[in-house]
Amino acid sequence: MRWLAAARIVPLVAYPLIVYFALDYIEAKYLALLLLVVLVVRYRSKARVFMRGMEHAAWIGAAVMALFIAAVWWSNDEYLLRLYPALMATMVLTAFAYTLRRPPSMIERFARLQHDDLPPEAVAYTRRVTQVWCLFLLVNAAIAAYSALFLSRAAWAFYCGFLSYVLMGVLFVGEWLFRRYRYGKEAVS
């Protein structure tokens, strides 16, 4: 079953690299159709659990993606196709920011998967971490959009397909280390 989960996520994570290599052989509009298939398969997975209470946001996100894919199909434009990572970062930013206005915050939702009963100080901490992720996602979306529109395909693929993931990992591990230092080992998970 793990291979099925990997088959659902790997094409989305590897999207910039797939586009980088495939655009020499396949038109942008056909890659947009492939993206549509991958997104439909991904949506049907159990990844929707974090959207509980935000179903209308999920529908809006699906509509935005449908419009995006239709625009790429109609225009057959490589630069528009390359905006997908920026669009995704913006959509994730929107979901995170939405939870700041309508709690629980996104990071609190993740934390409650392991610890159902969070003390008030943990709720405040998860809210602050959600704010940090919002800032990161905003900067990431801006860089992804800039690289899609103004940099070479190779530079775009490097940032969106590698460097942005490294930066996410640094933020994730950095927060984990800070939490361990600040709150002790019992707050690590």
Image (cartoon, grey):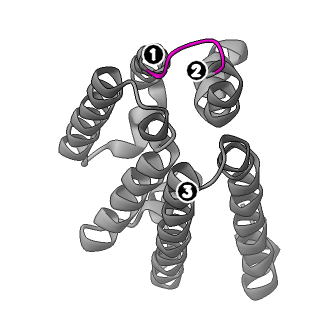
How many residues crowd around disc 1 within 10 Å: few (fewer than 14), some, or many (20 or more)?
few
x then y, percent, for residue 86? 47, 51
* Residue on which the image places disc 1: 41
Point out the tag, 3 or 2, that comes first from the N-terminus.
Answer: 2
Is 67 displayed left or right of 116 in the figure? Answer: left
Q: Is residue 23 above or below residue 30?
A: below
Point out the tag, 1 or 3, that comes first from the N-terminus.
Answer: 1
Cβ atoms at labels 3 and 2 below 8 Å apart: no
* Residue on which the image places disc 3: 150
In the picture, the disc for residue 8 is 2
Kindly identify the amino acid type of the residue bearing the numbered disc 3: Phe
How many residues crowd around disc 2 within 10 Å: few (fewer than 14), some, or many (20 or more)?
some
Circle 2: element type: helix
- CA separation, marks 1 and 2? 7 Å
Cβ atoms at labels 1 and 2 below 8 Å apart: yes
Kindly identify the amino acid type of the residue bearing the numbered disc 1: Val
